[in-house]
Amino acid sequence: MSFSQLKIGHMVPKVPIIQGGMGVGISLSGLASAVANAGGIGIISGTGISFDELRYHIRKAKESIQDGYIGVNVLFAMNDFAKKMKVAIEEKVDFIISGAGISRDMYSWGKEAGIPVISIVSSARLAKISERLGASAVVVEGHEAGGHLGTERPLFDILPEVVKAVKIPVIAAGGIMTGEDLARAIRMGASGVQMGTRFVASNECDAPLAFKEKYVQAKKKDTILVKTTVGLEGRAIKNHFTELISDDKKVKIKKCMDCLKNCSYRFCTLDSLITTMNGDCENGLVFAGARVDEINEILPVKTIIHNIMNEYKACI
């Protein structure tokens, strides 16, 4: 049975699964190349790493991939957005994906370089704007997603509206965990799905073991919405840090890195993510999707994808 429903530009993966870009340091070359080698599409997050580190991970991932596709996630909300895009283009990645805003320039830069640009959106209106500006596909992300959220609406409420609004491929994201979810998304007109949370609890994920264990140990009641300095709500696992920033409380910033175009300076979102990347998962943000409690073990990426596709076949 063929699973190649997903086609974006030159990319026709063996399975219609894109791994979500997760910063800081959660999805780098290790996770991205493992997903690509397992038949999906891998994403390196450019958030919170240097230009040299991004270049290094792109090259390392390319060397590790036998037959697959690798892209880079860059956030429009970050001050280094344009320079990170330039690095990705220079390194000839298969595609670039961007969220937290839309830039007219990014589509023209991608077109000039012959590299597909994908937008992360949360409404049919933003999907139509992205298509008009030159997006090769859109990822529609519902409220169930981990990290920063652009909507309060569930994925499967928004998905049919986006599918109807655009002619480019639509990728469903936010709370996707199983082959049943994949089958439902495809039945509703999606070309594939994007999954972030499930791939964190994998052997190859670049996150520290303490971060992965937070996912495995999480219960349904353990996720919380927090207002970050980006100006959006983000879904995270409860810990000491979420208590510190609850009720709009402030946490002293040790050193401002001037990373965001707009920041409330209530605390440092980037520093909190770097803290957890370094293994301290009580004193920084641990972003996770709404269904993180369904994860019970850390598995190889290949096994995760194999399980999802078996569940998908059972559904159809």
Image (cartoon, grey):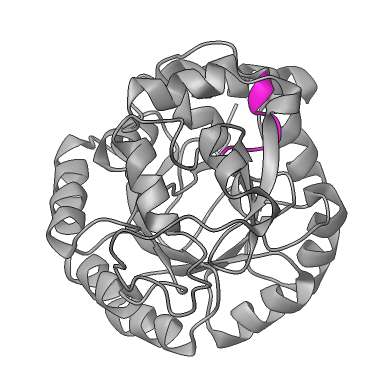
The residue that appears at 25% across and 66% down in the rendered structure is 88
Q: Relative to 101, is 235 on the left or the right?
A: right
The magenta segment: 288-293
Q: Relative to 227, is 258 on the left or the right?
A: left
Q: How many marks?
A: 0
Is residue 262 depicted above or below 182 in this figure? below
Q: Nearer the viewer, residue 201 or 242?
A: 242
The residue that appears at 36% across and 53% down in the rendered structure is 271
The residue that appears at 65% across and 58% down in the rendered structure is 248
Q: Is residue 49 visible in the rendered structure shown here? A: yes
Q: Relative to 55, is 121 on the left or the right?
A: right
The residue that appears at 68% across and 63% down in the rendered structure is 150
Q: Is residue 23 visible in the rendered structure shown here? A: no
Residue 71 position, x and y percent, is 35, 55
Q: On the rendered image, what quadrant is the N terminus found in?
A: top right
Residue found farthest to the top: 297
Is residue 161 depicted above or below 11 in this figure? below
Instruction: Residue 107: say if magenta.
Output: no
Residue 216 position, x and y percent, is 55, 16
Q: Relative to 298, is 311 on the left or the right?
A: right
Q: Nearer the viewer, residue 195 or 166?
A: 195
Residue 6 position, x and y percent, is 56, 49
Is residue 193 depicted above or below 74 in this figure? above
Is residue 140 depicted above or below 222 in this figure? below
Q: On the rendered image, what quadrant is the C terminus found in?
A: top right
Secondary structure mostly taken by the magenta-highlighted segment of the chain: loop
Residue 221 position, x and y percent, is 75, 26
